[in-house]
Amino acid sequence: MIAQAPNLDDLLGIGGIELQQVFDLGLVFFLHTLRLSAFFLSAPFFGAAAIPLQARIIISITVSAALFGLIEVPDPNSLPFLAMIRVVLVEVAIGLAMGLILTILFSSVALAGEKIAASAGLGFAAQVDPNSGGQTPVVSQILNLFAIAVFLSLNGHLYCIAMIRMSYEILPLGQPFAFDQLVGAGLDAAGHMFAIASTLMLPVVSLLLLANFTVGVVTRSAPQLNLFSFGFPLTILACFFALYFSTTPFSLAIRDMIDFMFIFLEDSLMDAG
């Protein structure tokens, strides 16, 4: 007896699911990953150059799979092509804006490190930073790594994913939002960056100011002393001692900064929604 060849409908059907349904499911999943992928591209730690692109893709797909079914997604078949393009651009804009706001606020630590290095005479001790693409003082990179360690120890990466989940409730997928509010939030974040950096660097810079004042008094009373051979080593040594003894207060200040970052981002999303 000759077996009957399967027809085209049997080949296109997979366990009762038609091929068109598979395409629609893939498109819906693609819409889930847009905001996450854009956020991981620009967010602190996730957007670092040290994180491989393959790891970001895997994380985006994994988190999107975990959120799949929990987010309301418009029917792809009911949207025309131009409307679909608008939804894609809106999702990418929201993810990039959220990540950039956190990155701007997180850059306060690097800015504080640059000012500390300049005050201590360590501005020449710089190396190429792969994240910024330019030369950054070593003190700034050390403080940045310290801030990342505090960020991870406080489960900041999990809070980032929770913020993404909450953003879908405030700014639903495919719905218009006040983009100018997010732009204004980015500008406000730049102002807060300088304020936070000033708070972080103030204790160390104040001690360095006292050290420079002491060097000035000593060199004024004993002009025969060489400023370069006496003042610079003392200032650098005072900087190292200040950074060592300010480790605990600095970690507490970074904890407060991280809390402020997420509160500021939540308020920005509420204003945009």
Image: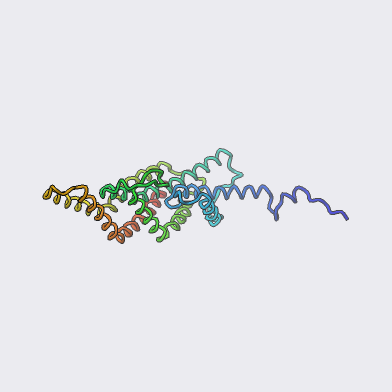
Residue 79 screen position, x and y as percent: 58, 42
Q: In this rendering, is residue 66 above or below 39?
A: below
Nearest the eye: 137 or 173: 137
Identify the colour scheme used: rainbow
Residue at horizontal 42 percent and vertical 58 percent from the top = 152
Q: In this rendering, is residue 28 above or below 249?
A: above
Residue at horizontal 18 percent and vertical 48 percent from the top = 226
Residue 239 screen position, x and y as percent: 26, 54
In screen coordinates, is 15 left or right of 107?
right
In the displayed orientation, state which residue is furthest to the front.
Answer: 224
In the displayed orientation, state which residue is furthest to the right.
Answer: 1
Residue 23 screen position, x and y as percent: 64, 47
Q: Quadrant of residue 188?
A: top left
Residue 28 screen position, x and y as percent: 58, 49
Q: Quadrant of residue 65?
A: bottom right
In screen coordinates, is 167 left or right of 216?
right
In the displayed orientation, state which residue is furthest to the left.
Answer: 221
Residue at horizontal 38 percent and vertical 59 percent from the top = 150
- Which quadrant does the N terminus fall into? bottom right
Nearest the eye: 150 or 228: 228
How many numbered discs? 0
Nearest the eye: 124 or 42: 124
